[in-house]
Image (cartoon, coloured by chain):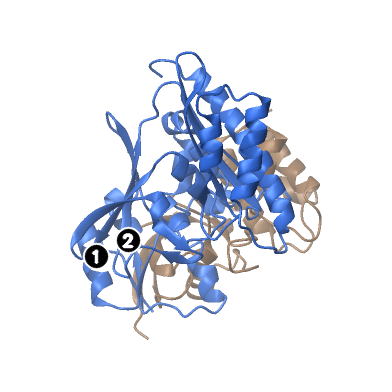
Chain colours: A blue, B brown
Amino acid sequence: MKYVAPSSVEEAASLLSSSPSAQVFAGATDVVPQIRAGRPAPDVLVDLKKIKELVALNSDGDKWTVGAATPTAYLTEDEAFSHEFPGLSEAAGLIGSDQIQNRSSLGGNLCNASPAADSVPAMVVNGVRAVVAGPNGTRVLDVSEVVTGPGQTALDDDEFIVEFEIDKMPSRSGDAYLRMIPRTEMDIAVVGAGARVTLADDGSIEQAVLALGAVAPTVVRIPDAEQALVGSTADEETLNAVAAAASEACDPIDDKRGTVEYRKQVAGVLAKRAVVIAIERAEQRNGTN
Amino acid sequence: MPRTHITTVINGDETEFLTEDSTSLLNALRDEVGLTGAKEGCGTGDCGACSILVDDRVNCACLMFAPEADGTVIVTVEGLADSGELHPLQQCFLEGAALQCGICTPGFLMAAKALLDKNPDPTETEIRYALAGNLCRCTGYDKIIRAVQEAAREMRGQ
């Protein structure tokens, strides 16, 4: 196995297309355990962290850009980012220990394509876009389009994510992400639920996006719950409809972390709670902040 | 296998070593540099026994490929004591019996150092979260938490 650390996106793209079993990595927090568990090691390991724009967190007038290999610790440490996107920041901050946080990245969490990846539902509800580089330049995908199944992505073998684009949070909007694990830290989601809402001037919900993780082969949106919320004030009856729609949207597996029945039940509870938190945050984001 | 030449600063000294690309930084530190303080527990980033500081951030050395260390500044448990005098964390672990077999201790010390470097007065909850990536199978965690609290107090001059 050969290690290479290109310093530009173009160089990385040409390395990937010239070597069929080359693999990109950022923190290697999934790659190393996978190799140790017996997955064949790639011939060439392409370290993306020496490419400047891949390890960067920037905000311009109307959007944030997050380099695909940026340690998730940066997202929780950056006060402006975590103030604007508390749900996404908290989701990224749930990935493993401090040791892992200093290595793990949004690009890795997404492309590892685990159904339980914590950052993905939070990215989906925030409409995050992935800028993908390949031999013929770049293209842009919605994060919701990237993962096609467990361990599978829509990226070609010679493509990789350069950065994520996140439109600034509008006023009267808020996001939230909650996950259920049987302990406090260091575990994989049994269920994860992300929510983002925008409120109208009269306090009713103008827009709602909900997504669940760990309950289906990929992250799933909950259109029925979103429709139930729009125009409502999230009264008890509406929230119960949200919970029912969330449970219904699940297509989970039985495993040591939880049964199908349990996951469906918890998905409903978490979806409801995530909506309530997102609304509270939206109410605090009046006007300019 | 061709070997790659790595230049790094370890515990304040410029250090060069040769390594195969697939070698973990942990194994390179132990086998090429001769620093055996960082331990391999799980080898998959779960137990924290290999925790070291890389450019002031705590990392699992088992999850890093050795060539990634090129150009970085590394601190291992061997770099904690100053001219033969134990670091307050080491002294407090010793006095508080915050270890039994000792395999996890270098990792706990480095994770605790990373915490106190950025937060000199952490709450118990903050300490427990900061050490969640370090497993101890002997003593339980209370003595470790108390040792970190005591060291933090001493380092604040209280």
> Which residue is more in the foreground, A35 or B115?
A35
State the residue lying farthest toward the bottom: B1
What element does badge 2 sit on?
strand
- The picture places residue A157, in percent across and down from the top left corner, at 33, 70
**Would residue A72 be seen by someone viewing this image from the given angle?**
yes
> Looking at the picture, which amino acid does disc 2 mark?
Phe
Please rate how many residues cluster around mark 2, counting C-alpha atoms within 10 Å: few if below 14, some from 14 to 19, many from 20. many
Q: Residue at x 55, y 32 (%)?
A: A228
Chain letter for mark 1: A
Q: Quadrant of the C terminus of chain B?
A: top right
Q: Quadrant location of residue B7?
A: bottom left
Sequence-first tag of 1 and 2: 1
> Which residue is more in the foreground, B79 or A21?
A21
Q: Is residue B59 left or right of residue B84?
A: left
Q: Is residue A9 left or right of residue A195?
A: left
What element does badge 1 sit on?
helix
Q: Which mark is residue B64?
A: none
> Looking at the picture, which amino acid does disc 1 mark?
Ala
Q: Quadrant location of residue B106?
A: bottom right
Q: Mark 1 and mark 2: span between their CA atoms?
A: 8 Å
User: Is B57 rendered above or below residue A230?
Assistant: below
Q: Which mark is residue A13?
A: 1
> Which residue is more in the foreground, A99 or B102?
A99
Q: Does the CB distance between marks 1 and 2 fall below 8 Å?
A: yes
Q: Quadrant of the N terminus of chain B?
A: bottom left
Chain letter for mark 2: A
Q: Residue at x 49, y 30 (%)?
A: A197
Q: Quadrant location of residue B79?
A: bottom right
User: Is A21 rendered above or below residue A82?
Assistant: below
Q: Which residue is mark 2?
A: A160
- The picture places residue B91, in percent across and down from the top left corner, at 71, 47
State the residue lying farthest toward the left: A136
